[in-house]
Amino acid sequence: MTSPDLITRAFAVVDASLRQYFPNDFHSRCMYASLGLAALLEDAGIYAQMVGGDFACAVVEKGGNRKGFHGFGLSANGAPTHFWVRTQDLLLDLGPTYLPHTSTLPLSKLPVVRWNLENPLPNYFGYSEQLRYSRDVQLSDATLQQRSDDFRTFCRKNALSLGVNFSLKSWELNSHVSLVSAAQRGDRWAKEMLLFLKSGDKARLPTR
């Protein structure tokens, strides 16, 4: 199993880098987040691969009772609408934490996903994989490629800032045990997901 401390720091560095590099729309830059995360993990000798596809997650209204599923949309031409990272044993994704920024409803905070793939994915979120990308993937648009290279360099520079205390703004979901622990700490989303699982029926969280 990959060191959790190393992954937590990589998550935190990439999140901070996104907010610095793309201050106005960091929440819609999942490709850059995945490229940056994969780069930091590869630098540490960990196999990491960016994956593209579609994503949806159960969400809960902040301070209300409305529930539903939210994601990053479906592409009209079949291209991936979301990107995340796979290691040999983990699915890694900052994306869920950014969903409240893209929703018309005020949503309860969501976790970072660091799911142990020894366990099946829970039915309160779904990943539909379309493509896996090599570490030296070259984007068709030269400007996009340069920006991607620059962002990875920016993440690496931040990662070397040992005196800077990068910290995640949310908890990490890695198994059912982590969901239960978060619910016991009072996390609203986690408590609702336990109820969702107990119901055994997605009708509890209808798609809007």
Image (cartoon, rainbow, N blue to C red):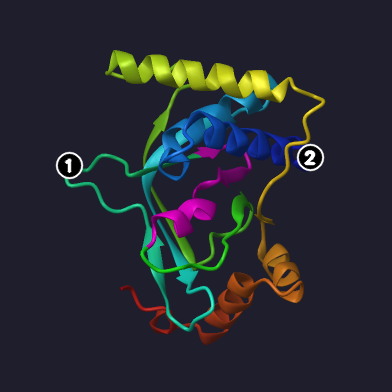
Residue 35 at what x, y percent from top left? 50, 28
Which residue is disc 1 drawn over? 77
Residue 166 at what x, y percent from top left? 73, 37
Which residue is disc 2 drawn over? 5
Q: Is residue 76 magenta?
A: no
- The three-letter amino acid code for the residue at tag 2 is Asp
On residue 94, which mark appears?
A: none
Report the residue that reaches farthest toward the left: 77
Q: Secondary structure at mark 2?
A: helix
Residue at image position (53%, 60%) is 121
In the picture, measured across the screen, residue 84 lies left or right of residue 40, that is left
Residue at image position (22%, 43%) is 78
Q: Is residue 58 positioned above or below 167 on the image?
A: below
The answer to whether residue 117 shows anywhere in this view is: no
The residue lying toward the viewer, choosing from 187 and 39, is 187
How many numbered dots are placed on residues in this image?
2
